[in-house]
Image (spheres, rainbow, N blue to C red):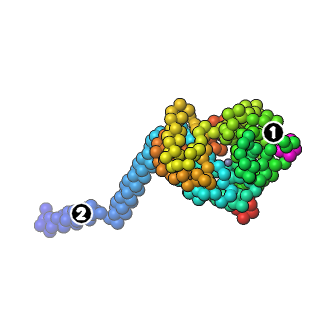
Amino acid sequence: MSTRRKLQIRNLIKKALKASRRQKEPSCALIRFGCSRIQKIVVLCISVCMLFMVCRTAVAEAIDQQNEPQKKVAVIIDDLGNNMKGTKEILNLPVKITVAVMPFLPTTKQDAMEAHKRGHDVIVHLPMEPKQGRPEWLGPGAIKANMTDEEVRAKVTEAIKDVPYAIGMNNHMGSKVTSDKRIMSVVLDVCKEHGLFFVDSRTNYWSVVPELAAKKGMPPVRNDIFLDDVHTIAHVQRQLAKVVEWLAEHDTCVTIGHVGGAGLKTSSGLHLSVPKLKEHAQFVGISDLVRDVWGWTGDPATNTTIPSDAQ
Ligand SMILES: [Zn+2]
């Protein structure tokens, strides 16, 4: 082979090697391919992280639910509607409660609307004749033992219409009337027709209300513990400790306190005891209790008066 031919071959090999080296360098397409792979890996990493966070939240929620006490306490506070002492403090409680608002009084609508706005349950606190006690304690629209069935029916209907957002009713005083089968039968009938249940406040040991309610297919719900028959914070706290004792043997507890003379003591006792009580029970509205325990499905929405400025 001539020297010239050898040189030509060497040049060709050099060119081929150069070309092959050029091909090995990453092309733009390769760079693009690399980027999209990195993007895919980043997206995958983010997805895995998000999935992990979602799972962790779900597990934490499940653990919280498992740790949440299963017992239920419904606190009812009576005697709202007359700008009574302790009303603001009671409505400010950090847990769901039920307020029993008396009809036909200066702050009836205001108190009911404010309670509803804060997520509390509202019931009608219907004045009923007691065996003893001053007539002026009764308040307007009271049910008395000498009334006819028609008179009782009219009074109860008017009271329901006067308290906005009411989903139930309980008795103010009433030690005489709650043991009267005729009258209480009419009261419960009107409540049922309006989708309301009736809570027996237990002002009379001989009350016929739970038995009558059960016969009429209504929840036989009643007060278990009075919070403030003595007007001191210490007494209210002692009664709340009794609620915990009660819950050791029962799944639910209904407990009743008041605004008015005892209002500030009752609200202070509750504010102080709520954190401890929350370790033992969930605070529920009385509507939650009658639905969960007795399957109550009464719907008062179509009958309850809602002021136009509250809508
Ligand atoms: Zn009362």
Residue 307 shows in the view: yes
CB atoms at circles 2 and 1 under 8 Å apart?
Answer: no
Magenta region's main secondary structure? Answer: helix
Q: Is residue 150 magenta?
A: yes
| Residue corresponding to mark 2 | 21
x and y percent of residue 264 in the render? 55, 55
Q: Looking at the picture, tell me which residue is in the foreground, 44 or 83.
A: 83
Q: Residue at x 62, y 54 (%)?
A: 260
Numbered disc 1: secondary structure: helix
Numbered disc 2: secondary structure: helix
In the rendered structure, find residue 269 and report the number of the disc placed on it: none
| Residue corresponding to mark 1 | 183
Amino acid type shown at disc 2: Arg
Amino acid type shown at disc 1: Ile
Residue 160 shows in the view: no
* Residue at mark 2: C-beta within 8 A of ligand 1: no
Taking the image as shown, residue 148 lies to the left or right of residue 52, namely: right
x and y percent of residue 245 in the render? 50, 35
Query: Which is more foreground, mark 2 or mark 1?
Result: 1
Q: Residue at x 85, y 43 (%)?
A: 147
- Based on the displayed image, in which of its 4 quarters is residue 86 positioned? bottom right
Taking the view exactly as shown, the residue that stands out farthest to the left is 3
Taking the image as shown, residue 112 lies to the left or right of residue 70, namely: right
* Image height of 122 relative to 248, above or below: below
Q: Residue at x 46, y 42 (%)?
A: 279
**Image quadrant containing the N terminus:** bottom left
